[in-house]
Image: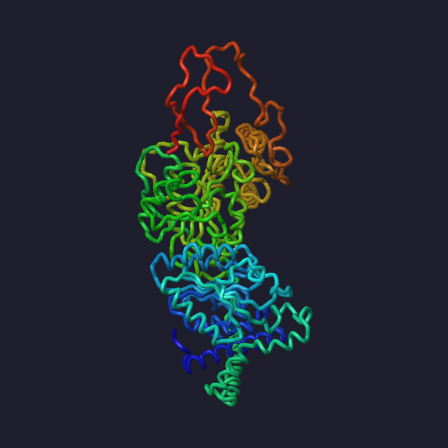
Amino acid sequence: MPALSKDDKLRLLRIILESRHADLREQNLIRQGKGHFHVSGMGHEGLAAVSIQMEPDDYIVSYYRDRGLVLGRGMTTRQLGLEYFAKRNTGSGGRQMPSHYSDADLHIWSVPTPTGSQLLPACGIAWGIKLDGKKNVVVTTIGDAATRQGDFFEAICFAKEKNLPVLFLVEDNAYGISMPTRKTNPLALEILKEDNWRQIEGQSVQQIYDATAEAFEKIRDGGGPFFFWVKMERLSSHTSSDDQKLYRTAEELLDLEKADPLTCWKDRLIKEGVITQEDYAELDNEIKERVRREYAEAEKAEDPSPNELLANVTKPPPKIEKEILSPGKYRIGDTVNRTLHAGLEEDPQRILFGEDIEDPKGGVFRLTQKLSTEFPKQVFNSPLAESTILGVACGLAAYGKRPVFEVQFIDFIYPGFNQLVTNISTLRWRSFGNWKCPAVIYAPYGAYLPGGSLWHSQANESALAHYPGLNVVIPSTPADAAGLLWTAMHTEDPVIFLVAKHLLWAEHEYTKPISAVPLGKARNVREGSDVTLVAWGNTIEKSLEALNKIGNEISVELIDLRSIVPWDAAAIEESVRKTHRLVVVQEDTENCSVGQMIISHVTGTPGLWNELLSPPILVSKPNVVIGYNPIYEYAALPDVERIVTAIRRSISAKYERATVAGIGDSGRAAPRAESDLPGSPIPATADLSEQHVQSITVPVMGEGIRNAKIVSLLKTPGDQIQLDDELCEVETVRG
């Protein structure tokens, strides 16, 4: 283990002094009304002893009290001054608060505010390093209060499971803003094994250096993760918006100097003869004046431009011209599997990760069958932990891998929603394009498949589409599934790829090769002149059934939106200008939905507003979830009759300029007779007791199964048949 040289000791002193004076300068500027916010790192500066040991290809994934840590890594006070004033030439372009460090060149990952949300991306970066066989290390930090976050436990579990090259540092300063934590953190509650957590005194720079030097050596030799609990004091209020004198006693505040790493380190170096008191005073004044100058210069630097507001939300998706699959008969399940196979074969940086996706299971919907057998270094089972799946995807993507991760059902994404909306969707924008997250998150979604109930049947595209930075696509055909997935896997930003379970195993035949499909480009399913009908996912099938029922009565142009974000406004505008009418069909709930967005766009565009001959209509699931009994499910979902009614009403409705109405007052179908309601019993067409020959109906198989074949008969002609007798054995043909 390398010892600290005299030069290193002095270097550490300079870094700690610089960190302290920068904090003090920002506090003074706040009092002067210059700047908006300050987060203090005073008391935490000793962690510079960690970062001065790091190698160029190591990573820091920190939190907002780590000024000393990032200065030790190589960031400058001038950079931090620019961040304080939210200037353009920073790691966030002025988009992040001060102390939300980001420097892609130094491998300092962009700090998110939500506490603890950085740990799983840190594990993703560490996993990428391990997969590449490198000897680099990820250092990730967290405050003691945030160790009660679920992501903390998921991260330490994943790091242990994968034996990752990551060093966890808990910075225990005894408070979560005003709440004391020393008796309520997981170490104090004995939730964590003390044997796994080395406890360090944070005011001892030497102890921090020695302990982490030993850890680095062992981690680089394949020793797996290390966990340090660093006891320190927060020498100032939580932020400039807080006053710790309200909740800490005067005696406690006076006692804090004993735990000041700057005082302790200075006194030690003077005692060792490394520096004299006079030399220290001179160094202190030199750094203080330099910090003052650099902040004065930073204040005058270039501000961001409002014209750059939308820059780096996402990068324009790629335009790919590539044949993916040859002509033939395919189902969506087939093309997803084959496209994933082609992606793994094309790029060894592409990683698949999800629950049950390894063989022999190959995913609950068999979308990944045989892939782990053929690509064992690229396809992995995940724990049952959605935050881990999404957080690790973010870290892997930021590191340079190409994650394609499965969430078993889109309904299960919400335990990982923090990672999705805090990190995955914002990373490019909040870092001004310096970091990116080219990850694909795919999941089965939707209903029209009885028995799924609340948490296997929702269509959640509106909630996902709400967050800037996420692309959202929903194929309704095998060709679109392959084409959109291929493009998604080559996009530089996150893509949510939703697979309609009900459509998984419906077979289509293609006489031409299947090619890549661009994001943001709708598909014209059927030409028409009277009404524009827009749908996507499962509602495409229902819309086609409705058009078959209407026949030649009305000429309907059917558009498959297929890409929710970005969406093809131009295609809908062009069609509405031709038909002068619009009906939108969606499976998702009505409130704040994609369908409402489309209608709002059409009615809010002056040229289109004048073209409309009748109010746009939204056919939608009402604001309710899917129930287990199929009666509830089919009562909620758009069906053929409601779509037909909407199309006919669009033709017959008188246009009222002041109103954009739906079917009925709420935009849903008006009540019908009970016998017409979805899920109501179908009236018998004959007295079955008089029939001697009956057909056998294949039971509902679930998971989108469409077909089955009889492989053996268990009864012969003339046999008596009782209720519940087994008649035959069937074999599904789902792949």
Residue 620, can we see it? yes
Q: List x then y, in percent, for residue 258.
A: 58, 78
| Residue at the bottom extreme of this rendering | 278
Q: List x then y, in percent, for residue 431.
A: 47, 62
Seen at 51% across and 88% down, the residue is: 282
Seen at 49% across and 31% down, the residue is: 542
Q: Nearer the viewer, residue 447 or 57?
A: 57
Seen at 46% across and 40% down, the residue is: 444
Q: List x then y, in percent, for residue 445.
A: 49, 40
Seen at 34% across and 58% down, the residue is: 132
Q: List x then y, in percent, for residue 525.
A: 43, 35
Instruction: Give the image quarter of residue 650.
Output: top right
In this rendering, position of residue 468 left or right of residue 55: right
Q: Nearer the viewer, residue 32 or 680?
A: 680
Quadrant (top left, top right, bottom left, bottom right) of the N terminus = bottom left
Instruction: Give the image quarter of residue 20.
Output: bottom right
